[in-house]
Structure formats: C-alpha cells, structure tokens
Amino acid sequence: MANTILIGAQWGDEGKGKIIDVLTEQADVVVRTQGGNNAGHTVFIGARKYVLHLVPSGVLRRRKVCVIGNGVVVDPIGLVGEIDGLRKLGVKVDDNLFISETAHLVFPYHRELDSQREILKGKNKIGTTKRGIGPAYGDKAARTGLRMIDLINPPRFESLLRQKIRENNEILKAFGATPLSFKEVHSDYRAAGDRLKPFVANTVVLLHNAMRQRKDILFEGAQGTFLDIDHGTYPFVTSSNTTAGGACTGSGVPPHRMDRVVGVMKAYTTRVGEGPLPTESAEIADMLHAMGREFGATTGRPRRCGWFDAVATRHATMVNGIDELAVTNVDGLDSLATIKVCVAYRIGTARYDYVPNDVEAMARCQPVYVEFPGWRTPTNKVRRWKDLPSKTRAYLKAIAELTGARLAIASVGPAREQTIFL
Ligand code: GDP
Ligand code: IMO
Ligand code: MG
C-alpha cells in the first residue's frame, strides 16, 4: 500500500473516519497532520460507535501505531478526556500513541476568543465549532503559541502561560468577557501535561524510522478541501491546510515519499457551518434528516445538505492530486426517483466549470444540473460491485468520471463490512 494521504474532497464529514478504519487494516502507522478537536470522525465496529476527535482513527485496530503530528493543534484537556473515553470502551491507548513535541496547544482563551469573535461577526459568523482552532493557529502563525514540548517542561510552561494569560485577559476584557484565572488554567494544564508526557515524542524521527523499516503510513486528513485555509471558501474555512500538502508539512514526511492520494466524498454534499454551498437543497436535507442522518459528530448541529457538486470535487482532484476515490453514503440516495448532479455553475449568463475564488461570487452561483435515474432499491446489504443495481453503478461511475479520479471504494453503510472495493 505504501504511504497514502487520505483527504476529504468536499466540506468535511465525508466519511473519512470509516474509510480510514477500513484502510488501516493494510497500514502500520496512522497519522493526523492538521486540525484539532474540531474534527469528528465516526467509526462503527459492530454495533459500537466511536467518535474520534484528535486520536487517529487507526487506534481502533490492534498493533497500529498512531501519531498526532506537528501540524495538529492539541487541546490537552480534550485529548486526556478522549483517551480516557477510549480506554473506557476497551480501546488500548498507551505505547501505540505518539504526540509531536512541536504540536501547538489550544488554551481556554483560544476557545473564548473563538466564541467572542463569532458573536462580534453577528450574521457574518463562520459557524465555527468553538474549539479555539482559529485563535490557536493564529498564535502559531504569530509565533506566540505554546507547544507540547513547553507543556511538559513545568518551569518554562509556568512562565510562558503566565504571560499568555495576562495578555489574553486584556483582550477578553475588551470583548466584555470574563478573564481567566492563571492558577486554574495552570493546574488543569499541568495535570493534563503529566498525563500526556509519556506520549510526547519526536514524531518526525519516528516516522522516518518507520519508513526506513518499510512500514506503510496512512495520513488521516481532517475537515475537507473547501475548508482549507488557502483553497477553501475563505473566510468560511478552518485554519489549517486540509488539502494533501498539509500531510507533508504537518508530519515532516516529504512530498516525494507520498505514494497515493485517496479522496473521500459523499454521494451527495453536506456542509456544517456558514458559507456558500451552491447545490444546497431542502428536499435532500429533509429526506436525510428524517432518516436521522447528517447531524454533526462534534457539535450535533444538523448538516446542510445538497446534491453532488462535481465542479467542487473536480477542483478537489486538482488541488489534492487525488488518485483514487472512496464514495460514501451511497445508500443515502436509495429512495430517490431522480438524482441531480451539478456539472457547472452559472452566474447570470456566465458559466463556470471551476470554483470561483470570490466567496460572494460563489454564493451567487446557480448549479447547472444533469439528472440521473434513481435505483430505488436498498444497497446497504450489497458487498460486491457487480451486485449493485446497474443504475447505482452508472451513477457512481459518472460522478467519479466528472471528478476525474479512479473509483476505488463505494460505501453503502457506516460499518466496516459495508464497503465495496473495485
Ligand atoms: P468524517 O468527519 O469525514 O470522518 O465523517 P463523520 O464521521 O463526521 O460523518 C460521516 C457520517 O457518515 C458518520 O455518521 C458515519 O458513520 C457515516 N457513514 C460513513 N460512510 C457511510 C455510508 O456509506 N453509509 C451510511 N449510511 N453512513 C456512512
Ligand atoms: P471533520 O474532520 C465539517 C467547519 C465548521 C466551520 C468551519 C470553521 O469531522 O470532517 P473551526 O472550528 O474549524 O474554526 O470551524 O469549519 N468544520 C468542519 N466541518 N467537518 C469537520 O471536521 C469540521 N471542522 C471544522 O463547521 O464551518
Ligand atoms: Mg466529521
């Protein structure tokens, strides 16, 4: 299998967790390289549901090494809670998890600033997960952030945190928010630091040693292409590079060591949070929500839903270099008589076959649809490609062709076994 980057080709929640879990069987090491606990990756094993936020989804399989890379922003309290939660469910988390020394930390003032900035933006809010992700990456870029290596060095941590709390309390006061107690934050974070210390490592050296031993590495993307800080629908994006390049910068594994890029996409489109979504449709949203589907794994918010947007996924193939596609939630379309696919955008009389950079133009884009006949048959029990209804196969082949990459996996349910390999 060699080294594989797996990314979301849409707006996040494409089913990356499920596909990572399936592909982990063939991998030795699974690495998160960007984002933080804004991510929510769902994996079902039997009837048991796991939602991973910071810990790579590979942790659910025995004998796999999991790495939280340098590009991730870590909320230490959240991570300790996640590890404890996994252990309670019987998942082993000890010498199989490594956290980069240089991963930046998320603090309560980041979360509070995230919330306050959203309030200030009013109707122009981003609709963030309020996990402090933007302010934490902001500190990293401003070179004022604290890292894992600081957290596990008590004297250094104390003096750096004191300074940060003092500075951020002034900002919080200006917002009219309640200032933080240094003492409380310090004791909570030091306790978390002691819990996390055994996991902290030089993960760049670790990954290169693994490659020298010819181990296969799977890079678990978080969020999706159109939430990328550079390539997404800015400013309605997250604060990291969610596209394939982020796997290199966020891990220290160079581009020429990457062997393939797998793009995960739903057979339709969803987005949680604000920002343009050209194919948004009440019809498909009502249908999916009535089935109890498409509620956020991190915040529980109902996801916005729409038809498959091939303009967007074609763009995703371009910026990520997607080789193979995994299409999930095929079963979500089982009951429809007609399925629409967006093949271009229109603004007035102008036709676009690419995603416009101007977010206001993007918001004005009207989808140009082609229609496919629905198969109106349950697909969730199908295990082989040739057993799928011919209309399902035609639909999947068409969206893969429009996206411009090879269809490799079709997923017909959340469970491991509901996976069809081509
Ligand atoms: P991620 O963030 O990309 O890992 O995706 P999420 O876990 O946030 O959301 C994807 C949702 O779809 C989860 O509830 C998964 O269990 C579910 N899922 C993934 N693939 C399939 C599928 O093929 N069919 C169905 N019915 N659900 C799926
Ligand atoms: P996974 O990995 C879907 C969205 C938020 C918001 C925007 C910015 O599960 O696919 P942030 O808290 O990152 O500053 O929010 O990005 N967002 C996600 N949407 N899936 C995610 O992760 C997301 N992580 C962030 O809803 O619109
Ligand atoms: Mg998710």
Image (cartoon, grey):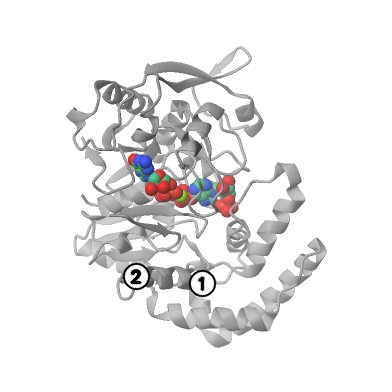
Q: On the picture, is 27 further left or further right than 52?
A: left
The residue that disc 2 covers is 97
Task: Where is residue 357? Give x, y as percent.
Answer: 58, 32
Q: Disc 1 versus disc 2: distance between alpha carbons? A: 14 Å
> Which amino acid, mark 2?
Leu
Task: Where is residue 5? Give x, y as percent.
Answer: 34, 49
Q: On the picture, is 136 further left or further right than 263?
A: right
> Which amino acid, mark 1?
Pro
**Count of marks overlaid on the render:** 2
In which quadrant of this rendering is ligand 1 seen? top left
Ligand 2 has an atom within 8 Å of the beta carbon of the residue at disc 1: no
Q: Secondary structure at mark 2?
A: strand
Residue 245 visible to the viewer: no
Residue 276 visible to the viewer: yes
Q: Quadrant of residue 315?
A: top left
Vertical position of residue 289 compared to residue 82: above or below:
above
Q: Tell which of 202 and 316 is nearer to you.
A: 316
The residue that disc 1 covers is 76
Q: Look at 21% across and 35% down and name the residue there.
A: 422
Instruction: Kindly give the residue lying farthest to the bottom in the view shown.
Output: 155
For marks 1 and 2 on the same chain, the one whose residue lies earlier in the sequence: 1
Disc 1 crowd, CA 10 A, few/some/many (<14, 14-19, 20+): many
